[in-house]
Amino acid sequence: MLLLSAFISAAFASQVNAAAAKAKAPKASSFAGSTTTFQFPPDDVLATASLIDSFFPVASVVGFPGPTPTGDEAESVATAPANAPVNAFYPLVRPNTSDNKGKSFNVVDSWANLSPMQSVESFGLDDTSELIPEGCALNQAFLLHRHGARYPTSGASPAAFATAVNAAASNGTFSATGPLSFLNTWTYRLGAEILTPFGREQLFELGVGFRVKYGDLLKNFTGLPVWRTTSEERMVDSALHFAAGFFGVQQYTSDYHQLIEIEQLGFNSTLAPYEDCPNANNEIAELGTQATTAWAEVYLKDAQKRLAPHLPGFNLTIADVLAMQTICPYETVALGFSSFCDLFTEEEWKGFAYSIDLTFWYTNGPGNPSVSAQGIGWVEELVSRLTQTRITTPRSSTNQTIVGSNVTFPLFQPIFVDATHDTVISAIVTAMNFTSLAAGGPLPLDHIPKDHTYIVNQISPFASRMVGQVLSCPASDKPTHIRWVLNDAVLPQTGIAGCKYDKDGLCPLDTFIAGMKQRIQEVDFDFDCFANYTFTLAGDKITTGQFPK
Ligand SMILES: *[C@@H]1O[C@H](CO)[C@@H](O)[C@H](O)[C@H]1NC(C)=O
Ligand SMILES: *[C@@H]1O[C@H](CO)[C@@H](O)[C@H](O)[C@H]1NC(C)=O
Ligand SMILES: *[C@@H]1O[C@H](CO)[C@@H](O)[C@H](O)[C@H]1NC(C)=O
Ligand SMILES: *[C@@H]1O[C@H](CO)[C@@H](O)[C@H](O)[C@H]1NC(C)=O
Ligand SMILES: *[C@@H]1O[C@H](CO)[C@@H](O)[C@H](O)[C@H]1NC(C)=O
Ligand SMILES: *[C@@H]1O[C@H](CO)[C@@H](O)[C@H](O)[C@H]1NC(C)=O
Ligand SMILES: *[C@@H]1O[C@H](CO)[C@@H](O)[C@H](O)[C@H]1NC(C)=O
Ligand SMILES: *[C@@H]1O[C@H](CO)[C@@H](O)[C@H](O)[C@H]1NC(C)=O
Ligand SMILES: *[C@@H]1O[C@H](CO)[C@@H](O)[C@H](O)[C@H]1NC(C)=O
């Protein structure tokens, strides 16, 4: 959409401004038309690679893949409706609402962390484009991305709903009518945890796109890239699909090193920091669920009244209705089509998006007191990389074995790539003080606020990507500025101490680093993650992801 309109306006502009453009055109140079070429990796880089292979064990050696149920095969050519519209995510079918069939409202925009990544239009800056500002050059890029579309996590509501339906059906008490009659023959085909085929495509595409946008930076590598992910099956698969897209399927096994950090309770990894933070695994982490449960009673009341009469003999609770709504995105990204989507109205889909915004705000975002602590380890690593200063003492979820070694944690790379989870991206943007995302303040549980700024669809969709662009303005070998691009739109850095408003979202590099060092001092990892404190939804309102001191 954005590209198309840019193309059209560019075509118009080229007619109107043809003369002006000619006047601006660069002077002819003696190298015009000469051939340039580059081959990665250069021979000297490749020669040293095998010596350090042993530092990068493959997934089967690292272990800790987590559960990997596969589910059943999709057959969307048979299950999708005959006239199903093609959409941006073909072969996934674009779903309808119940009240606005085929109209402009796009249900996918309301799937929050269960939505495939779509370009964000703006985070409020005048100039929101990820293209390097005029007068600057690109020196380095940091990519932090989420895995692609996956099945539900273990124990999530979709499987529980299927179990309840099946229990009633085998009891002979189940008979669905009207819009729910498809349930009489519905089977639950989803696996758990691992990527869906579409999720693999997303990461391959991200790799291809990153090569096209940033490939020239490869020329400044003096060794093979060391890129990181965690040990869960979907995390390893995402990293490898990214690499296959970036390097090519015959090259990726030899052209870089994949570091696989252990993701398991009790282990340190900044890409899975909740494994080293008790308050991310107790009742403090339940706040988001409490908020979502309260909100579901409000926004799904009508849906429950509408749908319950079509399931005589089945006690359809609000939790069931929320589970049915949740199945829509999961079936769509796994099977291409879901009969659950058009059971709900446009309002109810907006309510669904907000229900996930609430989960994230109060469990994985600015409203939870352990969240900045979870994000701060990656910020420490970022400062280490930007200042080329090695971390010598563990302070947070950093793993000293990894960050202490120049093999597994090189301090300078033209391109850094870290793969992680939705809840970690949301923790890191909180820890970094991108406060414009929290500008609307604590989220109410009974309505969607008018000035709503915390939108998970924009922060942590499937294959979400945040890119740190290190720039020199004017162009030189010495970087002067940094800015951050979240899902293709530039983030304001005005929440970071010292970073002033800039229409391109730029902050001087030294100022940014000082701000991050201040954040590292401000965030009390030991207390926020380990202390035994009470924090309640009703009584405690924060926007910094820190326990109030
Ligand atoms: C959505 O509604 C339009 C118009 O009724 C219809 O053509 C289309 O097939 C529907 N899509 C799905 C997925 O049911
Ligand atoms: C290339 O990398 C070196 C460090 O190895 C750095 O000093 C230099 O500025 C980089 N060049 C560019 C154009 O960024
Ligand atoms: C199964 O049937 C019995 C008797 O009608 C009923 O009490 C029970 O609630 C039913 N169980 C389910 C899961 O529907
Ligand atoms: C740190 O990482 C290394 C390498 O993956 C691993 O062997 C070690 O168990 C990790 N330590 C902790 C505390 O997580
Ligand atoms: C239906 O479920 C709700 C919520 O779990 C419960 O309070 C209610 O007693 C149930 N009703 C019947 C008839 O089982
Ligand atoms: C893991 O993190 C804890 C702090 O949570 C720290 O005490 C420990 O030294 C770290 N271990 C490693 C290997 O970095
Ligand atoms: C790491 O540091 C050691 C000691 O300074 C050096 O010999 C080695 O070449 C370095 N390795 C890499 C991959 O930079
Ligand atoms: C981060 O944001 C909080 C809340 O706006 C502010 O009090 C704090 O000074 C900021 N810290 C930095 C380093 O930007
Ligand atoms: C936390 O403190 C409360 C109240 O003092 C106490 O009841 C509880 O057992 C403590 N929990 C842990 C995990 O220490």
Image: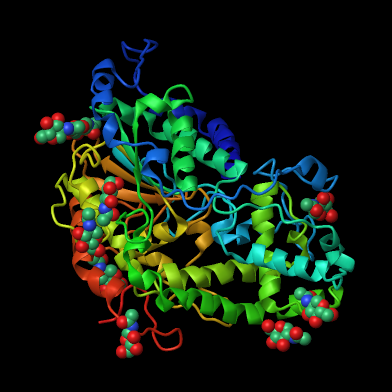
Count every numbered label the image shows and give the total. Answer: 0
Q: Is residue 25 visible?
A: no
Residue 549 appears at what percent x and percent y? Answer: 25, 82
Give 406 or 433, whichever is nearer the viewer.
406
Residue 10: % across, % down: 55, 36
Q: Quadrant of residue 45?
A: top left
Color theme of the render: rainbow
Q: Residue at x 89, y 67 (%)?
A: 178
Task: Residue at 18%, 46% (x, y): give it.
Answer: 404
Give x and y (percent) for residue 396.
Answer: 24, 62
Instruction: Locate the N terminus and report the quarter of the image it occupies.
Output: top right
Task: Answer whether residue 91 is visible to the viewer in this image.
Answer: yes
Quadrant of the rendered image containing residue 308: bottom right
39 up-or-down from 355: above or below? above
| Spot occupied by residue 195 in the image (x, y as percentages of width and height) | 56, 46
Left or right of 56? Residue 92 is: right
Q: Residue at x 56, y 75 (%)?
A: 292
Viewer-proximal residue, 216 or 26? 216
**150, 71: nearer the viewer:** 71
Q: Is residue 203 left or right of residue 438?
A: right
Which residue is located at x 32 percent, y 12 percent? 31
Figure quarter occupied by ligand 8 = bottom left
